[in-house]
């Protein structure tokens, strides 16, 4: 065997004096160029009447599912971690920082197909779940599979999940258990259930010859969906339908508001990342804005810096942008706003008020500040205060908070 000690650079690399130049590729790349996307006209998924579930159903835990249910309920903050794993799985595919996409409907057909895999991968990592002997997972020492569908009831079950003499070698070695996952980003809903798969709980159909005989309803991959009659056999974790999938802010804004944000520009200039982020904090006030939203709006490598710079650009308009550091959490609490954590921001419009103003307020250098009312916004606001950082607070006697309202 001949061992090659080295290979010559390709001609274009020799010509430019560098190897694998990212700068050269970026000059002509279309991947990272900002683009806008249309508002989806169709819903993310379907919810058949037969599969509708309600929040908070009272269900006894079946004995055969109890080990799996108990395992999930024993994990610290399991529900919070589960819903965020679903959120992150979709956000990974949207890839907003590079594509500008903000809705499931913007994905390609291939990407939509991969969402189930992304959900499984992220839940596996989130809960550090072991590999099963025959299936994806092992929980409480037992094999269990993870299934995702954007359509409630649309989970597709392969032959290896259940016992069937007609399947021969392709039959499962047991009637295994599945974790059924579902989310709808349009409605901020999600659900997770656990069910044991059996041949009779899967779809059947009538023979086409009119004989009245039933045959198994396979798809082209020899998978079958759960039959509607199996719905009572599903144990829904955390009480059925959940209405708090972490919010996709851009998806839920009014279309005109979203358009103003994503097309924001200076006069006679094209839209820029900084202008879009500035507009985001102008349009969306008094509510938390997450990192994913800022990254999607800015679509730049240094997107978080755009949020920090927005403080400078918007202060003259009476707007402050609060983050998670320094004086900002204290100010948010004083104004009775949601308090940002790392990777979150919140903007609000401030107005100078007297010390006897009944509104929640804080004081800085002897001046009190409160959130502006609608009538004050119509008259126009002066500049907002330049908020000190933590070091200045610790050493400045004149800085104080008034938590009364």
Image: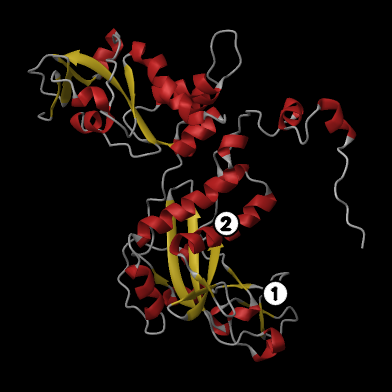
Percent from the top left, x then y, of residue 350? 26, 18
Q: Which of 392 and 117 is in front in this view?
A: 392
* Mark 1 or mark 2, earlier in chain: 2
**Residue lying furthest bottom in this view?**
165
Q: Position of residue 376 (x, y in %)?
A: 24, 13
Q: In which quarter of the image is residue 166?
A: bottom right
Extreme left residue here?
356
The quadrant in which the N terminus is found is: bottom right
Residue in the foreground of this view, choosing between 141 and 197: 141
Residue wearing tag 2: 118
Q: Can residue 352 be seen in this view?
A: yes
Classify residue 98 by image quadrant.
Answer: top right
Residue linked to disc 1: 222
- Tag 2's secondary structure? helix
Residue at point 56% right, 64% down?
154
Q: Residue at x 18, y 23 (%)?
A: 395
> In the image, residue 364 lies at what x, y percent?
18, 18
Residue 137 image label? none
Image label count: 2
**The residue positioned farthest toward the right in the image shown:** 2
Estimate the spatial distance between the alpha carbons at disc 1 and disc 2, rounded to whole Å.
Answer: 22 Å
**Front-most of 261 and 398?**
398
Residue 10 vs 56, above or below: the answer is above
Residue depicted at x 50% and y 72%: 130
Looking at the image, residue 318 sits to the left or right of residue 81; the answer is left
């Amino acid at each position: 065997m001949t061992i090659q000690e080295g290979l010559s650079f390709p001609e274009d690399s020799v010509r430019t004096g560098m190897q694998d130049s990212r700068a050269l590729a970026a000059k002509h790349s279309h991947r990272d160029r900002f683009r806008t996307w249309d508002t989806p006209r169709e819903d993310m998924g379907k919810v058949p009447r037969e599969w509708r579930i309600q929040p908070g159903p009272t269900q006894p835990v079946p004995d055969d599912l109890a080990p799996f249910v108990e395992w999930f309920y024993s994990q610290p903050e399991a529900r919070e971690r589960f819903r965020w794993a679903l959120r992150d799985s979709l956000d990974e595919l949207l890839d907003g920082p590079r594509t500008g996409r903000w809705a499931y409907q913007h994905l390609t057909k291939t990407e939509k197909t991969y969402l189930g895999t992304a959900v499984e991968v992220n839940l596996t990592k989130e809960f550090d779940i072991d590999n099963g002997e025959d299936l994806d997972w092992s929980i409480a020492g037992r094999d269990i599979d993870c299934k995702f569908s954007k359509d409630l009831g649309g989970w597709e079950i392969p032959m290896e999940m259940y016992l069937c003499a007609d399947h021969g070698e392709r039959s499962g070695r047991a009637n295994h258990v599945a974790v059924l996952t579902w989310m709808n980003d349009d409605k901020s809903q999600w659900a997770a259930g656990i069910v044991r798969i059996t041949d009779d709980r899967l779809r059947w159909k009538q023979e086409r010859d009119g004989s009245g005989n039933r045959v198994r309803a396979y798809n082209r991959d020899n998978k079958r969906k759960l039959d509607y009659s199996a719905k009572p056999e599903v144990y829904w974790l955390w009480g059925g339908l959940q209405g708090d999938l972490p919010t996709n802010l851009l998806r839920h804004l009014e279309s005109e508001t979203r358009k103003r944000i994503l097309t924001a520009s200076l006069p006679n200039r094209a839209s820029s990342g900084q202008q879009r982020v500035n507009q985001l904090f102008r349009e969306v006030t008094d509510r938390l804005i997450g990192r994913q939203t800022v990254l999607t709006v800015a679509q730049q490598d240094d997107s978080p810096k755009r949020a920090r710079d927005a403080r400078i650009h918007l202060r003259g308009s009476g707007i402050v942008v609060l983050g998670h550091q320094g004086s900002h959490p204290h100010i948010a609490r004083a104004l009775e706003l949601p308090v940002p954590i790392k990777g979150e921001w919140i903007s609000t419009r401030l107005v100078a008020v007297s010390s006897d103003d009944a509104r929640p307020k804080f004081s800085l250098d002897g001046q009190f500040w409160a959130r502006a009312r609608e009538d004050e916004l119509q008259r126009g606001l002066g500049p907002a205060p330049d908020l000190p950082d933590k070091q200045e607070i610790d050493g400045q006697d004149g800085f104080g908070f008034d938590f009364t309202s």
